[in-house]
Amino acid sequence: MLENCFFLLAGLLLVVVGANYLVDGASAVARKLGLSEFVIGLTIVGMGTSAPEMVVSMIGALQGKGAVAVGNVLGSNIFNTLLILGLTAILLPVNITRENRHRDIPVNLIITVVVILLGMKFSLFGLGAEDGLGTWDGAILLLLFVGYMWMSFRTGKAEPQPEEAGREKPVPTWLALIMILGGLTALVFGGRWFVNGATGLAEIAGISEKFVAVTILAGGTSLPELATCVAAAIKKKGQLALGNIIGSNIFNLLLILGGSALIHPLSFQQITPLDLGALLVSAIALVTCLWVGKRNQLDRLDGSLFLVIWAAYMTYLVIHL
């Protein structure tokens, strides 16, 4: 009991501290390289905060447990968009740039649809898994990931900053890199400790394993994204938060699922239409916010709607355990 409480509190502390240093370090690197905070969030931060999902999915693929790899990614993306981005928008309305509107948000939807279709259509070329993602599907997802990353870096120059932004004390490059690496390390270990502590307490309380998987574990692997986005919102770096979520989603769908499918074909047999529907709805909701509420901004109304959809989905899952 005491051990579980220690891991729960220590993990939470590591996540909070790690998120703070990661956001500051990533912002400093963005300014040094002349890249937008969105692109840094999309790449360095998005990939780093997705490390727990990568570990879980890759291990699941190596063990031949495709349902673990697929379910972890789908659940994480739903959690990322609906709960984390919804909460972030309530704390700090996020401005949406022209590139976000015409490229990043639509690409998030397109990639979601591609993965769903590949998973449901019994493999693209009839090779590999007959009910999910096969080897060729994984290769195609990886190629799409490389192409999107190349396009993002090519067009990801920073926009002119307001005068007050220029007054921020510059951080040496070596220190910024240490902050990023240290922050990511703290997020990964803190998230793992938090999940282990919470799972242990749930078992002591007699809560079912399925309930733990649906709630604690699904949210636990996305804890780094949650902490990073909340820290970014507090520091008024909305583009970094948006980049973190979209980058994490794309990283999950293309790189993690693609790489896992190359290791072992991924079955969609245990993935229900409701799960795929919730994933699609989360991507559509992000596109819809472009026309609902304030123009060019993910505002508090959008964030509230995201949270309502997430709560409805989780309530259904809990009721039908």
Image: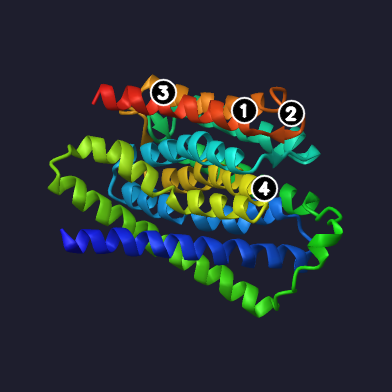
Q: How many other residues sit within 10 Å of disc 2, few (<14), some (14-19) or many (≥20)?
A: some
Mark 4 crowdedness (10 Å alpha carbons): few <14, some 14-19, many ≥20: many
Earlier in the chain: of badge 1 and badge 4, it is 4
Q: Mark 1 or mark 2: which comes first in sequence?
A: 2
> Between marks 1 and 4, how big is the CA–CA gap?
16 Å
Q: In which quarter of the image is residue 176?
A: bottom right
- Left or right, residue 203 beside residue 306: left
Q: Can residue 265 be seen in this view?
A: no
Place residue 7 in its image quadrant: bottom left
Going by the numbered disc 1, the residue's amino acid type is Leu
Residue under label 2: 294
Q: Position of residue 290 (x, y in %)?
A: 71, 28
Identify residue type, mark 3. Answer: Ala
Q: Of 99 and 168, which appears nearest the observer?
A: 168
Percent across and percent down for residue 289 are 66, 27
Q: Which mark is residue 301?
A: 1
Q: Quick check: can you spot residue 262?
A: yes
Label 2 – label 3 distance at C-alpha: 24 Å
Measuring from the top left, give residue 123's x and y in whole percent: 45, 29
* Lower position in the chain sequence, tag 1 or tag 3: 1
- State the SS at label 2: loop
